[in-house]
Image (cartoon, rainbow, N blue to C red):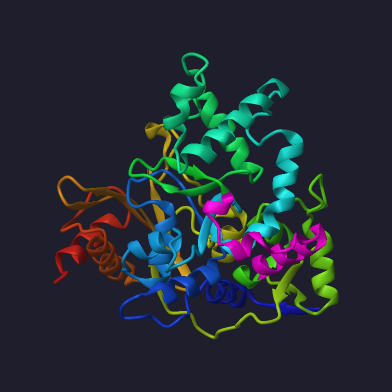
Amino acid sequence: MDSLSAAQARRIALAAQGFLDPAHATPTLRTLRRTVQRTGVLQVDSVNVLQRAHYMPLYSRMGPYDVDLLRRASHHTKAQPRQLVEYWAHVQALMPVDLWPHMQHRMDSYRATRGKWWPLAAAQEGLEHEVLAAVADRGPVTARQLDEQFSTGPREREHWGWNWSEARKVLDFLFMIGDVAVAGRNGSFEVVYDLPERVLPADVLAVSRPSAEESSRELVRRAAISHGVATARCLADYYRMPMQPGSGGIGAAPAIAQLVEEGELLPVRIEGWKRPAYLHRDARIPRKVDARALLSPFDPVVWERERAERLFDFHYRIEIYVPAAKRVHGYYVLPFLLGDRLAARVDLKADRGTGRLLVKAAYAEQAAPADTAMHLAAELDRIAGWLGLTSIVVEPRGDLAAGLVVEVARLP
C-alpha cells in the first residue's frame, strides 16, 4: 500500500476540485461545465446574506463571472438543452442532468418510505394524484400557486422554517420520487415544479435504467474524481450514499471494492489519518497549489467537516443557527484559501442597500502567512466588485481585523 504525506493529500484534493485549472479572462459556459465536472454538484441553500450557495463554488474557482451562465445552464430551451437540474444529490443540489438516471434507485427508496422529511399518510395518496394532475395542467408552478386549491386549513406553526402547506409537502414527495422535477426558482427563491418530460432533455429520460450496482459504482467514481483522495466515508458522503446497500440497492462499500479491484481506486495511507484512503488513478499530485479564494460554507472542499479538519487542520462549524451571543466566529463565515492552506476565516455580509461589503469579523489561522491580510484584502476587493458593492467596511472583531483595515485602506 502506497502512502501520501498530509501536504500531498491536501494538494491532490484542491487540484481535483479545480484550483489548478487555468483562469479564463471571461468565464463562459464551457468554463462552467469544466468547473462542475470538478465539483460534481452545486449545493443549493436559501441563505442570501452574501450570495446564494450554488453561485459561490463557481466564483471560488472561476473568479468573477456572469451569474446568468448558471441560469442558462439550469434552464431548458430549444436552442440550449438543460445541463443542470436540482435533486437531492448531496443534499438539495444542482447536478448534471446525466446523473438523473442514477438517482432513480434513490427515488424508489423514497417512494417505498413515503418521503424523506415525514412519511406521507396513505390517506394522502389521492391528494398526490390531484397535485400531480395540477402540475401537469398548470406547470411550471410553485407550491404557493397550488396552496389555495389544496389547502386543508391554516398552516402549522410549531416547526420554525418547516411550516409547509399540504401542497408543499406533497410536491416535495413527488419531487423526491421523481414524479415531478424542479424547473427552476422564481425571484423569491421558491421552487418551481413541472413534469420531468418538460424539464429534462428527452435523451436523458430515454436512458435505460441502470442497475443499482451500476449507479453505486458511478456515484462513487464521481465522488472519487471530485475528491482526488478520500476515505470510504468521504466517498459515501459526497452523494449521501449508505455504506451498505439499503432499500434502493445503492451502497458505497461494494462499489469501492469493485473499483479497487478494477484498479480505478488505489488504496493509500495518508500521514496523520487513522482510516485508510483511496486515490483515484487519474488524480493529479501537484508539487504546488497557488490558490486564493473565499469558500462558501457549502463548498465541497469544506462541507464534510471532519475531512476539512484532517486536510487543513481547520475546525469549522457553521453558526447560522447558533444564538448570536454564543457564536464563536460569526453568522456567515467563509474560509479563506491561500496557497494550499486555509489561512483565515471571515464573517461577511453584503449590505446591498448601501453598496458595502461588511467584514463583521476576521480571524487568522495559527499557521497563516504574514501576508494573509494583504491577500485577503485583495480577494475582498474582487468579490465586492463581482457582487456590485462599492466599498469594504472592516469591523473591529477578530485578530486579523486590524491588519485587514490597513490593507483595505491601501487598495487602489
Side of 282 relative to 332 (left or right): right
Q: Residue at x 62, y 74 (%)?
A: 9
Side of 320 relative to 266 (left or right): left
Q: Is residue 216 magenta?
A: yes
Q: Residue at x 55, y 62 (%)?
A: 201
Q: Position of residue 184 (x, y in %)?
A: 44, 49
Residue span colored magenta: 196-224
Quadrant location of the N terminus in the rendered image: bottom right
Q: Residue at x 26, y 65 (%)?
A: 377
Residue that lies at the very extreme toward the bottom in this rendered image: 287
Residue that lies at the very extreme toward the front in this rendered image: 137
Q: Main secondary structure of the magenta part?
A: helix
Side of 28 relative to 318 (left or right): left
Q: Can you say whether 78 is above or below 158 in the image?
A: below
Q: Is residue 93 visible?
A: no
Q: Can you say whether 277 is above or below 282 in the image?
A: above
Give whichever of 113, 367 is nearer the camera.
Answer: 113
Q: Can you say whether 24 is above or below 259 in the image?
A: below
Q: Residue at x 78, y 54 (%)?
A: 250
Q: Is residue 276 magenta?
A: no
Side of 118 relative to 397 (left or right): right
Q: Position of residue 197 (x, y in %)?
A: 57, 53
Q: Position of residue 109 (x, y in %)?
A: 75, 43
Residue 132 lies in quadrant: top right
Q: Position of residue 130 (x, y in %)?
A: 59, 29
Give whichever of 123, 250 is nearer the camera.
Answer: 123
Q: Is residue 280 visible?
A: yes
Quadrant location of the C terminus in the rendered image: bottom left
Residue 254 lies in quadrant: bottom right
